[in-house]
Amino acid sequence: MQSLWMLFASFMFAIMGVCVKLASDMYSTSEIVMYRGIIGMIVMSCTILYQGGSFKTTMPGQHLWRGVVGVIALWLWFYAIAILPLATAMTLNYMAPIWIAVILLAGGFWKGMKQVEWPLVAAIAMSFVGVTLLLQPVFETDQLAGAITALISGMLSALAYLQVRKLGLLGEPEYRVVFYFSVVNFLAGVIGHVASAGGGPIVWHAHTSGYGIGLLAAIGLCATMAQMAMTRAYRLGKTLVVANLQYTGIVFSSFWGVVIFGDLFDWHGWTGIGIILASGIAATYYNTRNTARGAAIARTDPIASEV
């Protein structure tokens, strides 16, 4: 039952995506990232103080690396959500497990590994077939930049997840990982907004309505709850079940995209989403069960499947 926390996390991430897309009409991406960080900091600070935890860490460099890579991925993802159909942006970002497989394969060849893991190669190849089908209409529109941005976001998310796994192996509790990531979000949002002024006057969008404030609050709360639920699921649930349940986020996002934004896909788009989803599940299954390396990771690292 603990694995079902991932369903909650996926639902919250999908709600966050909806709120980001709506808030993009009123706020810049930098501002959204900043407010997401502020709310995350407040929530996690209260959680740490209430539970008697500690803000002190012995690995600030590891947190900084995870934060910088993660916030760039988040920034690009929010930008992609603003200009792409919601399901498209979410699907491309959820390709992180595929990029992890690419990284592991490339690392194996770099280290002289002679045995080719053909199931992983097949999963990677099929995922890119899915991307081609999903983005076929996009190449003829002004949304190409958003599609490329979402793909890069997924790649950087893969690197961030690898760093999250490393922090977990080093014994860093999840609440500190989430807290310091929120801190980096806040700082990056402020710096990005100041830099976007280009030396001119710095203009912050006024909170003229409760609607805008509500969207920003929902983004921060949904993102923080989703991160905590996801971490809990990976630590207490069955890793393979949890890793596969994360792809329900694509289903949730597709539903909200159709209902709220009127996003429509032809058979190419829906087939592409299905292929990407199936390829991600296959890659996760192979990495966690069908190899000696994956089996060892699954036994010793409770959050390994997060990557």
Image (cartoon, rainbow, N blue to C red):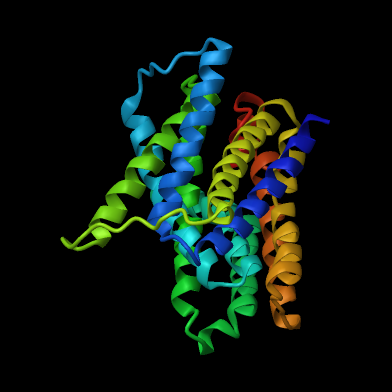
Residue 221 in picture, x, y percent from top left = 59, 40
Tally the numbered discs: 0
Q: Is residue 107 visible?
A: no
Q: Is residue 189 above or below residue 29?
A: above
Toward the front, the furthest residue is 208
Q: Nearer the viewer, residue 36 or 81?
A: 36
| Residue depicted at 61% across the width and 52% down the height | 16
Q: Quadrant of residue 84?
A: bottom right
Quarter of the figure with the C terminus: top right
Q: Nearer the viewer, residue 127 or 175?
A: 175
Residue 204 in picture, x, y percent from top left = 34, 55
| Residue depicted at 56% across the width and 63% down the height | 21
Toward the right, the furthest residue is 1
| Residue depicted at 60% across the width and 56% down the height | 19
Q: Is residue 243 visible?
A: yes
Q: Nearer the viewer, residue 49 or 241?
A: 49
| Left or right: 225, with 162 as reference point | right
Q: Nearer the viewer, residue 53 or 294?
A: 53
| Left or right: 275, with 193 as reference point | right
Toward the left, the furthest residue is 199
Q: Quadrant of residue 302?
A: top right
Toward the bottom, the furthest residue is 140
Q: Is residue 181 above or below residue 88?
A: above
| Left or right: 55, with 83 as reference point | left
Quarter of the figure with the N terminus: top right
Q: Quadrant of residue 127?
A: bottom right
Residue 136 in picture, x, y percent from top left = 60, 83
Residue 275 in picture, x, y percent from top left = 71, 68
| Residue depicted at 53% across the width and 60% down the height | 23
